[in-house]
Image (cartoon, helix red, strand yellow):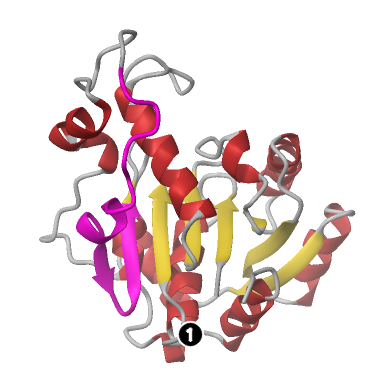
Amino acid sequence: MSLKIAVGGKGGVGKTTVTALLARCLAADKSNKVIAIDADPVANLAAGLGIPEDEPITPIAELSELIAERTGAKPGTMGGFFTLNPKVDDIPERFSKERDGVKLLVMGTVQSGGSGCICPESTILKALMTHLVLYRDEVVLMDMEAGVEHLGRATSGSVDALVVVVNPGARSRNAAHKIKKLGQDIGIKNIVILGNRVRGPEDEELIRSSLPGFDILGYIPEDPEIVDGDRAGHRPFDSIEQAPKELFAIAEKLKSYGKQ
């Protein structure tokens, strides 16, 4: 299956934990090859997937020797000449960590020049994201910064869906409208809501009624193990089969956006 999903949401809504849980649910079907992309500057997806802290992951943006080799320019430099279409197809296998059928890639951030700079690091990141979205017949889940900053116009039209994680709080619901506009501006067609930390029908109705015009992917109930894992920075559920049934139903709905 080819399925490319971006996950966004206001900070603090549990976006990273949700991304990790959905990746594990999708990987439970052994026929799916799953790659999880940590594209949030505050990289926490490794903990959510249960990758031990003693297995440090160097973000792609910090692989200085690789960037220099592939682009022909030293990281941190601005201007000058360097390759704008570097080779990246071997990076997912060489620089990912895997657990329970989910490969993790940590993108990292460009430290100078702003998010729109043309520099060797940003060139590698954009080329890698393009490769993952356009040329891999796999399930790719991308834990984004609050919006969709890592997705350029060249790749965004091929993202199957943008999942905006919200909780019943007003701030996260307001952020959903802004994220939807960002996604629409760069050509993402399917923008859906996933309610997290939902305590019952009243919370579901609050989310549904305050976000008219959005399709609702589903709701994840408030679960003590998910909450504790989120707070402590470790993954909930040693076995993903122990996760709430609602998560698996949401993963099944996500599949409907993909291509067989």
Q: Position of residue 112 (x, y in %)?
A: 33, 17
Q: Label 1's element?
A: loop
Q: Please tell me whether residue 88 belongs to the stretch shown in magenta.
A: yes
| Quadrant location, the N terminus | bottom right
Q: Foreground: 118 or 165?
A: 118
- Kindly identify the residue that appears in the image at 38 percent across and 37 percent down: 125
Residues drawn in magenta? 82-105
Q: Amino acid at mark 1?
A: Ala
Question: Mark 1, residues whose alpha carbon is within 10 Å: few (<14), some, or many (≥20)?
Answer: some
Q: Is residue 98 left or right of residue 55?
A: right
Q: Is residue 166 left or right of residue 84?
A: right
Q: Is residue 62 left or right of residue 24?
A: left
Q: Position of residue 94 (x, y in %)?
A: 21, 57
Q: Is any atom of residue 164 visible in this view?
A: no
Q: Please tell me whether residue 67 belongs to the stretch shown in magenta.
A: no
Q: Is residue 33 left or right of residue 223?
A: left
Q: Which residue is mark 1?
A: 243
Q: Is any atom of residue 72 visible in this view?
A: yes
- Kindly identify the residue that appears in the image at 54 percent across and 85 percent down: 244
- Kindly identify the residue that appears in the image at 53 percent across and 52 percent down: 134
Q: Foreground: 193 or 14?
A: 193
User: Where 79 falls versus 254 (above or below)?
Assistant: above
The image quadrant of residue 168 is bottom right
Q: Position of residue 61 (x, y in %)?
A: 28, 35
